[in-house]
Image: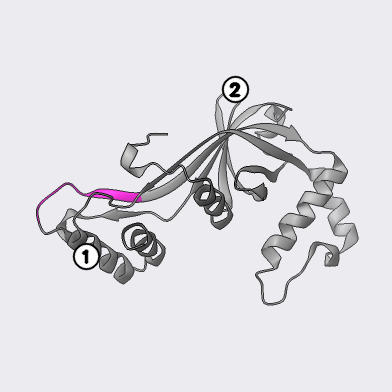
């Protein structure tokens, strides 16, 4: 990942929270060619020591390359958006603001019992936010048993983490305020909030 110093994020608490807030990641692996797929990720542990849990469908072309200790890259993407320089007081180059976390990790395949446990935790984690949660234990047993052989579960132990948040650091505050106002007007409220948090802590 390209990480200019002023956009670099190294705070472990920030990274841990970012992953929790953006749990739908891109998994990249080297197969006969580079392969990528999009997966929901459950993070367990603390900001200083955590593991990531997920699964893919067995008919996914990536499946045959999933083996213990295989190195993979997980990409977590935050809010992002085009920033026109027409919003600045003085002419400048337009840009794109964004945030992301890249995690290099080793895969460990799960046993069936481990898959059941992490799948239940994943389902319950996201169902908990619903008005009428349908937890894992309330799913039809036969339906679950029929689907389990069709997926492969795994967990990942990170060995390298890189994070970036390009939020107009170093820009004039008047320009930042104009950008935030424009982003909110366009409906990109999360990126506007991210800029506010960066500049008006």
Q: Give 199 or 62, whichever is nearer the viewer.
A: 199
Which quadrant holds the N terminus?
A: top left
Residue 48 is left or right of residue 100, and the answer is right
Q: Which residues are magenta?
A: 90-97
Residue that carries the numbered disc 2 in the rendered image = 32
Looking at the image, can residue 68 be seen? yes
Give the residue at the far bottom of this rendering: 131
Residue 47 image position (x, y, % from top left): 60, 47
Say which residue appears at 45% left-offset and 46% top-offset.
Answer: 100
Q: Is residue 66 left or right of residue 170?
A: right
Residue at x 66%, y 72% (from the top left corner):
130
Counting residues from the start of the chain, the first of labels 2 and 1 encountered is 2
> Does residue 91 belong to the magenta stretch?
yes
* Residue nearest the observer in this picture, 157 or 111: 157
Image coordinates for residue 5, horizontal then vertical, percent: 33, 37
* Left or right, 200 with reference to 58: left
Which quadrant of the rendered structure holds the C terminus?
A: bottom left
Mark 1 burial class by Cα count in 10 Å: few <14, some 14-19, many 20+: some
Residue under label 1: 178
Per the image, label 1 sits on a secondary structure element best described as helix
Residue 142, by quadrant, is bottom right
Name the residue at the right extreme: 142
Q: Position of residue 145 (x, y in %)?
A: 88, 52
* Residue 74, placed above or below residue 127: above
Q: Secondary structure at mark 2?
A: loop
Q: Is residue 46 above or below residue 193?
A: above
């Amino acid at each position: 990942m390209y990480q200019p110093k002023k956009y670099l994020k190294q705070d472990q608490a920030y990274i841990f929270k970012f992953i929790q807030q953006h749990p739908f990641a891109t998994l990249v692996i080297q197969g006969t060619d580079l392969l990528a797929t999009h997966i929901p990720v459950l993070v367990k542990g603390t900001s200083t020591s955590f593991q990531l849990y997920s699964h893919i469908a067995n008919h996914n072309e990536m499946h045959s390359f999933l083996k213990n200790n295989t190195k993979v890259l997980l990409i977590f993407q935050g809010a992002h958006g085009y920033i026109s320089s027409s919003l600045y007081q003085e002419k400048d180059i337009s840009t794109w603001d964004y945030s992301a976390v890249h995690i290099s990790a080793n895969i460990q395949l799960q046993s069936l019992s481990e898959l059941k446990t992490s799948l239940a935790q994943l389902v319950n984690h996201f169902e908990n936010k619903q008005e009428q949660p349908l937890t894992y234990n309330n799913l039809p047993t036969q339906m679950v048993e029929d689907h389990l052989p069709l997926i492969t579960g795994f967990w990942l132990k990170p060995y390298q983490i890189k994070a970036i948040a390009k939020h107009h650091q170093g820009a004039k505050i008047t320009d930042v305020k104009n950008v935030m106002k424009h982003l909110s007007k366009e409906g990109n409220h999360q990126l506007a909030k991210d800029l506010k948090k960066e500049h008006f802590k």
